[in-house]
Every structure is written in C-alpha cells, then in structure tokens.
Amino acid sequence: MASKPLRIAFLTKDGTYLPFAIRCLIEGCEVRAIWTKPRKSRIGVGMVDELPLGKLASWKPDAVVVDCTGMGKIADRLRKIGLPVYGGSEIADFLEYERDKVLDLLKNAGIAVPETYSTRNVSQAIAHVKKTGESFVIKLDGEKGAGSSLTYVGDGPEDVIEMLETYSGKIGGALINLQTKVRGVEISTEGFFDGKKFLDGFWNHTLERKKFMNGDIGPNTGCAGDVLWWTESNKVIEQGIRKLEPILGKLGFYGQIDLNTIVERILPMNPGDKGATFKVWGLELTPRFGINASVTLMQLTDQPMARFFVEAAHHQVREIKKAKGYACSVTLSIPPFPNKTAEIPSKDIPCLFDLEILSRVNPLDMWWNGDHFESAGDGGWICSPAGTGATVREARYDAYSVVDRINLPNKQYRTDIGDKAEEDIKTLERWGML
C-alpha cells in the first residue's frame, strides 16, 4: 500500500514561503499556506492552496513551517496545542529584532563586536556622528529594521548624517544603532542548533551581494545574489558562531541560525613583527530561513525538503544529506524594485519559462493565472534563479543559464554575482580561516 503524501503547512505573513512550498509540491506533498496578515498581493495564488489558521489543527499537518520571524507568538501557541512546528518562536523574534541586546549576547559569548552607539532619537544620532567625525553603519531595531533595505553603510560622516535626516519622522521611534565600520571579508555562517549544541554536519557559508547594481553600487536590496556551500568546521566558525552554544542553550533556541561576520586582517604594529592576525567580528543574527540564502541552499540539499521539515518539526534532525560544490543565485526583479512604489506597473507582468526548470527558478513575487506565471505585485522581486557547480565559476554560469531561460519584460539583475565570491574565498583560504 502506498504511503500517504506528507502534509506540510506554511505559516506566512508576506509570502516568503513560496520557494519552499514549490519544492514540497514537486516532491508530491500536500501543501497549504496560512496567512497571518491580510495579503497585499496574489503571491502563491493558483500554486498553493490556502487554509484559515483556525482549521490548521483539523487538517493534521505533518509539519508546520514558519517562513520568517515576526510570528513567534502564533508559532509558540501552535506548539502548545501539540502541532509539530518548525521555524519561528518568540526567542527567534528576540534574536532578530532586539539588535542592541543581541550585541550584548555576542559580547558575553566572547565574540568581538564593533563599537555601537544606540539611540531612539535621530537628532542624538546625528550629533554623535558630528562629534566623532566617523563613518558608521546604520541599523534599525525591530521588525521594520530586520530587512537590510533600511541598513545603510556609510562612506563618511556626511552621507551618514544625510541618511539619518531622511529617517526623521519615518521610523516610528525605532532604536537606531550606529555601528563602527569594520573592513575585511564579510561572510555569514549558518548552523543548526538542536537545543543543546550545533550539529556538525549542517555548517554552511554565504557570500552575499546586497547592493542593487554591479560593483556594489546603488541601494540595498536585501539580496542581489549570493554564493553558498556546505563546510566543515573552520576558524570562522570556531571564532564566531560556535561560541554561542552556551547562550543559545540557556535561551532554549532550536533551529537554523546565522551569524553575519566580517573577518579582518590585522597588520603587525611594527615592521619587524611576525605575520598578521585575524579577527572575526560578529554583526547580527538571523534565526530563520535566509532569503535568499536558504532558497539557494536548497539546490545543494540532496534529500526531500519535506522530510527535513518533518524531522525538524519533531526535533529529530540528526543530519542532512548534502551535495558537493557551490550554489549561486541571482535576484531577478522588475521596476520599481528595489523601491515599493512607482508609475511603472509591477503587477500581472508575464513571467514565462519551461516548467522543467521550476525548481531552479525559486518563485517569490509570482502567481499562476491558469496558463502561465505572472508577477503578483509585491514590490518586484520576482524570483531567484539558482545554479550549482563544482566551482563557484561553474555555479555562476549555471545560475545565469537559468536567468537566460526566463522571459520577463523589463527584467533587471546584476551580471557580476559570483565574481567577488571567488576572490573572497581565496582570500579567506590564504588567511587560513576556511
């Protein structure tokens, strides 16, 4: 007798679940989407059936997957009534949204943290920049600041002040963190924490490009493209995220978590001193699926994603089957992205491609009209085409081959994703950090 298909439900507030849901549908699962906030677009319509939150328990899912932070109270409530939930929690919301408190946690864990000045007053923030005469990275606390589109990396005190002035009256009293700039190689490390320790078989790294245009020019986008790979333990891990084990255990955290870091090369003070030393700076935590990182990593996950979700929801993850090599993805968008409003229409734009590559397209702002895919009108980040390869160069070529197979009017994307990643990996290997 054939076994019944797994039932996977996705709890979402903005539709970021869609690539994972498509993967589960391809694997033959029954899938439902539960929206916790009124939908603003048609993301997933015609692709994934929906279910009211009140009917979730009677549907008897094998796993309930929370696709992002901000739904921790709902997720924990579902756990209390006995549903197998993986993803969000109130602890995860705290770790992502309370940036100033999380920086203290990193310090207490022995992780180096750039000096940070925090205030809820824009005028005080501007005064601090004028007083120090330094450049800063601007980061906001809370759900509004969780997306990196509001993060600003200054080139000098003048443009930091100008950006702070634009925030005045628009950020609703959010905590403003002015973080001293650190120069080096920026790299993220994700691990899977089982409630007591990190699983050694789950480590992966991300090199991400956030700026909209080639050469890291233009506004932040969240992610313009990335390169990922599975890894064994190394110095970036041991001097960074591994140090969080005791604190995460005390907090009762469970699941995927990423530490964004910068590896700095510190030159000898005197010419006669021996070689340089290296410092891993902790910047922020991401206790959820990375969008776009987790979407890209699916290309290197050599097992059904639904099986992983079920095991994770039942606290039974022991290992994950991994494919060798690298994965690369490219953000494919249409105007007005990376802005939200413009005269140019972003809804119901046809997005045409052969369905055989659907698992590599990774739809985000899309719906199915019964004949073909169209943009759903949620800002213009349409999809994240991904590729794999034995080298970064091969993965990059494979990703752009998928981009070329997608017919999307006014499509826009960077053409240099992966170039800097090759250089950064070689640098970190030469430094002995990877």
Image (spheres, grey):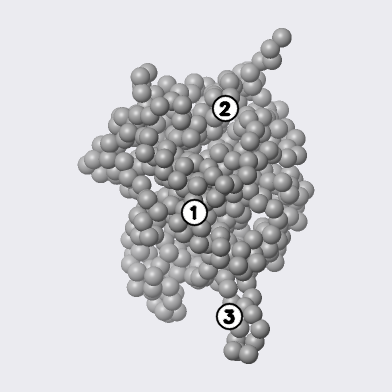
Could you say which disc has been placed on residue 24 in the image? Answer: 2
Per the image, label 1 sits on a secondary structure element best described as strand
Query: Residue at image x 65%, y 33%?
Result: 303
Instruction: Bin the neighbour count of mark 2 within 10 Å (Cα to Cα): few under 14, some 14-19, many 20 and up.
Output: many
* Residue sitting nearer the eye, 63 or 318: 318
| Real-space CA distance between mark 3 and mark 2, rounded to the nearest whole angstrom | 49 Å
- Alpha carbon separation for disc pair 1 and 2: 26 Å
SS of the residue at dot 3?
loop
Looking at the image, tell me whether mark 1 or mark 2 is earlier in sequence order: 2
State left or right for residue 214 relative to residue 357: left
Disc 1 to disc 3, C-alpha distance: 26 Å
Residue located 70% across and 56% down the image: 233
Q: Amino acid at mark 3?
A: Leu
Residue positioned 35% across, 64% down in the render: 163
Nearer to us in this view, 315 or 395: 395
**Percent of width and height locating residue 384:** 44, 40
Q: Residue at the location (60% across, 89% down)? A: 270
Residue 323 appearing in the image: yes
Q: Which residue is mark 3?
A: 267
